[in-house]
Amino acid sequence: MTITGFILRLLAALILVLLTYNPSGYSLFHWLWPWQNSHLPLKILALLVVLIGWIVFVRATLRSIGVLGVLLASALCATLIWLFVDQGWMNVHNTTTVIWSVTIMISIILGVGVSWSHFRRRLTGQLDTDDVDE
């Protein structure tokens, strides 16, 4: 995998997370809440497409790095945020900043998760495969 492939996966994860929710007010969450029946087929279609994206990304992430990997990546990202707050580079009293930080953190975890099998193969020479019963 090239750096371009990793960046594209990371951008896809970022787009998925930001389409779902972001503090700007332009997201699927803001469009659907409060629920109204106007444009119902379009809303359900958008919800299903985003849900499929989440299932693909979460499943690939859990298969490649597992729950422990997700916890470690979350701890690493949370520690980075803690460092930024401790150094005065980030204000936790600003909820918008915290929400942006969390969305970026989730995007990074998903982006690394879907790319991890490629990283691991490059680093160790080991290939990840799925067990398939025939």
Image: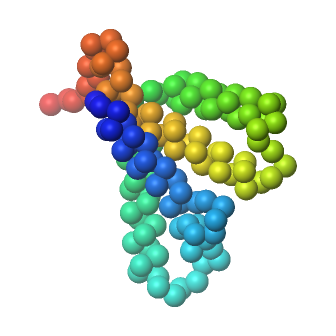
Q: Is residue 131 visible?
A: yes
In the current view of this chain or complex, which residue is farthest to the top? 124
Q: Residue placed at 65% from the left, 28% from the top?
A: 75
Q: Residue placed at 74% from the left, 29% from the top?
A: 83
Q: Position of residue 115 (x, y in %)?
A: 37, 33
In the current view of this chain or complex, which residue is farthest to the left? 134
Quadrant into which the N terminus falls: top left
Q: Is residue 62 visible?
A: no
In the current view of this chain or complex, which residue is farthest to the right? 93
In the depicted structure, whether residue 119 falls above or below residue 109: above
Q: Position of residue 114 (x, y in %)?
A: 39, 36
Q: Position of residue 116 (x, y in %)?
A: 39, 28
In the current view of this chain or complex, which residue is farthest to the bottom? 38
Q: Nearer the viewer, residue 67 or 80?
A: 80
Looking at the rendered structure, the number of numbered marks drawn on it comes to 0
In the depicted structure, whether residue 29 falls above or below residue 69: below
**Residue 112, located in which quarter of the rendered image?**
top left
**Residue 7, located in which quarter of the rendered image?**
top left
Q: Nearer the viewer, residue 30 or 91?
A: 91
Position of 44 with respect to 130 (left or right) is right
Quadrant into which the C terminus falls: top left
Q: Residue placed at 84% from the left, 49% from the top?
A: 93
Q: Residue placed at 57% from the left, 74% from the top?
A: 31
Colour scheme shown: rainbow
In the depicted structure, whether residue 114 falls above or below residue 29: above
